[in-house]
Amino acid sequence: MFNPVKLIKSLWWEYLSYFVPEKMEYEITGECKKCGKCCNYMYSFDTYTEKEFKIMQFLYPAYKRFYIKGKDEFGNFIFACKYVTKEGLCSVYEKRLPMCKKYPMKKIPYPADLHEGCGFTVHKKKFSDYLKK
Ligand code: SF4
Ligand code: SF4
């Protein structure tokens, strides 16, 4: 049976759905414990093969500081920087790359994981958290 209240409610929710932000942001807070894990174990979103990595290094000579350290259980390359000391500190701190200065960003558009024991925390939000706003 036709229910006008139900229809109005549906239209109202449909209307509200246009105001749901499409881009989710995850906040990162905390401070660096200087463990050096992020300089010793890196992943790349752009590089999938050794050849592609060499091309990247050719195009961006600053990336020559990175080398392939191994592979994880899924076959993804793990990279490391040759400038990290045994103590986990940056030996070229004043000349580190912009990406190093920005790491970790204050907000990211995906629910990433940081290294175990890292002093920073990604505040992962569920969809229901956005509905509460
Ligand atoms: S993994 Fe986290 S705590 Fe360790 S050096 Fe990197 S940012 Fe700092
Ligand atoms: S340049 Fe320094 S901060 Fe950047 S990855 Fe290398 S050791 Fe880490």
Image: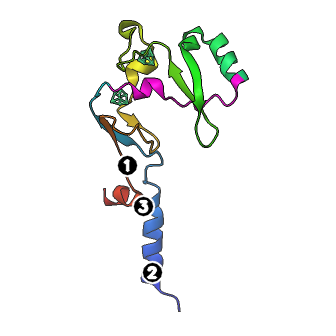
Give the percent coordinates (x, y) of residue 58: 66, 11
Image height of 29 relative to 68, above or below: below
Ligand 1 is in which quadrant of the figure? top left
- Report how far apart the C-alphas of labels 2 and 3 lie in the structure: 15 Å
* Residue 37 painted magenta: yes
Secondary structure beneath disc 2? helix
Q: Amino acid at mark 3?
A: Leu
Which one is earlier in the sequence, the residue at label 3 or at label 1?
A: 3
Ligand 1 neighbours mark 2 (CB distance < 8 Å): no
Q: In which quadrant of the rendered view does residue 85 lie?
A: top left
- The dot on residue 100 is none
Give the percent coordinates (x, y) of residue 60: 60, 12
- Picture residue at 73% right of the left edge, 22% below the top: 51
- Picture residue at 43% right of the left edge, 54% below the top: 20
- The dot on residue 124 is 1
Which one is earlier in the sequence, the residue at label 1 or at label 2?
A: 2
- The dot on residue 16 is 3
- Residue designated by label 2: 6
- Report how far apart the C-alphas of labels 1 and 2 lie in the structure: 34 Å
- Report how far apart the C-alphas of labels 3 and 1 lie in the structure: 24 Å
- Picture residue at 56% right of the left edge, 14% below the top: 63
Of 13 and 86, which appears nearest the observer? 86
Magenta residue span: 35-50
Verify CB contact (< 8 Å) between mark 2 and mark 3: no
State how the image is colored. Answer: rainbow
Q: Amino acid at mark 2?
A: Lys
